[in-house]
Image (cartoon, helix red, strand yellow):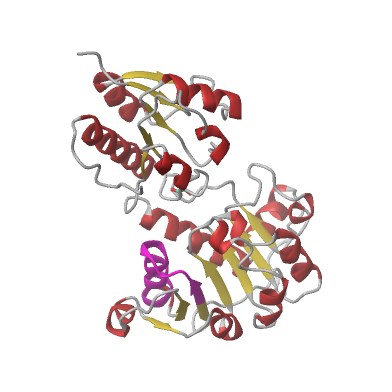
Amino acid sequence: MSRPRILVTRRWPAAVEAVLSERFDATFNSDDIALDTGQLRQALLAHDAVLPTVSDKLPAALFEGDAIRTRILGNFGVGFNHIDVASAKAKDIVVTNTPGVLTDCTADIAMLLLLSVARRGGEGERELRAGLWSGWRPTHLIGVKVTGKTVGIVGFGRIGRAFAQRCHFGFGMDVVFHNRSAIDPMEAARYGAVQLPTIEDVLAVSDFVSLHCPGGAENRHLMNAARFATMKPGAFLVNTARGDIVDEAALISALEQGTIRGAGLDVYEAEPSVPEKLKTMENVVLLPHLGSATEETRTAMGMKVVDNITAFFDGREPPDRVV
Ligand code: DGY
């Protein structure tokens, strides 16, 4: 029997590509440049499985018509708001993701951003590399102590919890959170966290706000001008979730007006484009979507995709089915 024909839209860790080549008739995008809409449409027409990432936009229009050959989209990543899953489902296309394996590394990057903005790590590094450091002095690059401060978490899923654990047990912070559904207080206490009734309640008391909810239509611009205005004066924002959760124009205004003191960002509304204004702001730390970027995690993510599509083509239920 011929092996399923699969298209991998980007280069993946070598160990995972080796397994994919063994099991499937696999084509890799050797250029490793994001495919455009036409190429993605062709991929859906010509392959039994397409394995996209966050850099591949798959809107409803791509699923139109009867000629689609793809039966499963094995997404490399936990977030899948770049795929119109309702349209995929309507075409009986299964969509899977990679939950669990990137929890710790993404929480680490949120911690890195929180510490970097609080302690002015980016500014210090830029100054030193530019040869502008004139030596130690008591008033040089004074930041904000994190121990004893309050961090507010928006979205208390796996990554939000792992981040809460780091903040509370690792850095002695008080942790409050907002989550759409109620979390058992005993469960929240395992992460040193307390649920508050509304997002506004969280914003009003937090010295740092970190976003850990999904992206997509539901949470688009959840952090808008009105919400920035309710943040505690001098607070910081951290976003490692999805860029569209933050209205970047409103964020820039809040930073310019000093409503908030700084921001640490790993994700953007129109990646890989980043607003020029943000790049000029010293009190903003910018990373290029590195949340899950460790050898161990990227390999584990790839292996999860392998497990999902192997199960599917063996006639079993894929373990991480989204629709
Ligand atoms: C994820 O897994 O959602 C990462 O952000 C990469 O897509």
- Taking depth in this image into account, of 110 and 308 the one nearest to the observer is 308
Occupied quadrant, residue 115: bottom right
Q: Residue at x 74, y 51 (%)?
A: 275
| Image x and y of residue 54, in percent | 51, 42
- At 62% across and 76% down in the image, what residue appears? 144
> Can residue 163 be seen at all in this image of the molecule?
yes
Magenta highlight: main SS: helix
Is residue 164 highlighted in magenta?
Answer: yes
Q: Reply yes or no: does residue 168 show up in magenta.
A: yes
Residue 300 location (% of width, % of height)? 31, 42
Vertical position of residue 212 compared to residue 143: above or below: above
Q: Is residue 270 left or right of residue 68?
A: right
Viewer-side residue, 143 vs 129: 143
- Please tell me in which quadrant of the rendered image residue 246 appears: bottom right
Nearest the camera: 3 or 45? Answer: 45
Residue 115 is left or right of residue 4, and the answer is: right
Residue 161 in picture, x, y percent from top left = 37, 69
Residue sitting at x 70%, y 73%: 261
Give the quadrant of the N terminus: top left
Please state the extent of the stretch shown in magenta in the rendering: 152-169
Task: Pinpoint residue 99: horizontal percent, then vertical percent.
Answer: 34, 51
